[in-house]
Structures are given as structure tokens and as C-alpha cells.
């Protein structure tokens, strides 16, 4: 028996967010807690919220959690930039918003996975920034 096929791993799996949201909506949070008794109630609540976001995104419903300074069209452009491979930090810099706002927009639309900037690209950008700051510091001293 491999580690992934042990009885505990087969029985006590992380619940599907959509299924948790559906059971919570139809039968209540107590029924979901009874079904997934090994998951803490707070975690189950978070998983249900994630499932509702996914269901709303499938239905084309976008529920904005806060009033924002950017329009829906700008949010669409943010999402397009992230999904084109720019990553959340690149989209935040490009549109002049915080990275947390970009992640909130993605979550509201039910997008849980998005392209991430590779480690090599991040390391190269960090190295370039560090060298530029060092050059500015040295120019300021002379």
C-alpha cells in the first residue's frame, strides 16, 4: 500500500469546494459539518465560500466584495493580463493597484489557479533591481 492509498487518505480527503457550497446551500452548514466531520468548521466555511465563488463564476455572476476605484472593464483587463502570463505582481504594477486587489478580483471571479512568474524570472528581476539600487546609491555618494 502506498502512502496515498492508505485508508485514511482515501476516506479523509479535502472536500470539493463546489460540493460543500451546494450542500451548505441546500441543507445548511450543520449538514456539511456532519458530512465532513474531520474538517474544522472554520475551514469548511472558507471552503464553502470558495465553492460559491466558483459556482457564481460558472454562472457568469460576479459579486464584488468591496467598492473599488477601478471599473469592471479595468478588472477584466487585470484578469486578462494575469491570465496572459504576467502574474499578479506584474498586473498590479501595470495598472497601479495593489497585488491584493488583483488576487481579490481573481477570487471573486472563481479563478483559483493562475499563471505564476517563474523562479528564474523573479530571481533575475530581483538581481536587476538590486544592481540598479546599488548603482544609484554609489552615484549619490560621488
Image: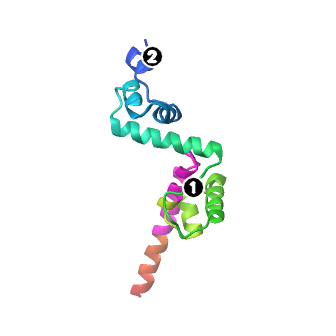
| Left or right of residue 129: residue 7 | left
Dots 1 and 2: beta carbons under 8 Å?
A: no
Residue at 35% from the left image edge and 26% from the top image edge: 37
Q: Which residues are magenta?
A: 102-130
Task: Please determine whether, in this image, residue 53 is positioned above or below residue 12.
Answer: below
| The stretch drawn in magenta includes residue 104 | yes
Magenta: predominant secondary structure element? helix
**Residue 46 x/y as whole percent:** 41, 42
Instruction: Identify which residue, 31 or 118, lies in the foreground.
Output: 31
Q: Is residue 78 above or below residue 131?
A: above
Which of 67 and 86 lies nearest the eye of the viewer? 67
Tell me what residue is drawn at x 45 percent, y 16 percent: 5
Where does the C terminus fall, quadrant-wise? bottom left
Find disc 2 in the rendering and name its residue: 5
Q: Position of residue 7 (x, y in %)?
A: 40, 14
Q: Secondary structure at mark 1?
A: helix
Label placed on residue 77: none
The answer, for residue 9, to whether it is visible in the render is yes
- Assess whether residue 20 is covered by the magenta stretch: no
Q: CA distance from mark 1 to mark 2?
A: 35 Å
Residue 140: x percent and y percent? 42, 85
User: Residue 87 has which mark?
Assistant: 1
User: 10 Å neighbourhood of mark 1: few (<14), some, or many (≥20)?
Assistant: many
Circle 2 crowding by C-alpha within 10 Å: few under 14, some 14–19, many from 20: few
Amino acid at each position: 500500500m502506498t502512502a496515498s492509498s492508505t485508508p485514511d487518505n482515501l476516506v479523509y480527503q479535502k472536500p470539493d469546494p463546489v460540493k460543500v457550497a451546494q450542500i451548505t446551500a441546500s441543507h445548511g452548514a450543520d449538514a456539511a459539518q456532519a458530512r465532513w466531520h474531520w474538517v474544522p468548521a472554520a475551514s469548511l466555511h472558507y471552503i464553502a465560500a470558495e465553492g460559491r465563488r466558483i459556482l457564481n463564476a460558472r454562472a457568469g455572476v460576479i459579486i464584488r466584495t468591496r467598492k473599488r476605484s477601478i471599473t469592471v472593464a479595468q478588472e477584466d483587463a487585470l484578469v486578462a493580463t494575469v491570465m496572459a502570463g504576467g502574474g499578479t505582481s506584474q498586473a498590479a504594477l501595470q495598472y497601479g493597484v495593489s497585488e491584493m486587489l488583483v488576487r481579490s478580483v481573481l477570487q471573486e471571479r472563481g479563478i483559483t489557479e493562475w499563471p505564476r512568474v517563474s523562479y528564474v524570472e523573479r530571481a533575475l528581476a530581483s538581481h536587476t533591481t538590486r544592481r540598479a539600487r546599488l548603482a544609484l546609491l554609489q552615484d549619490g555618494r560621488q
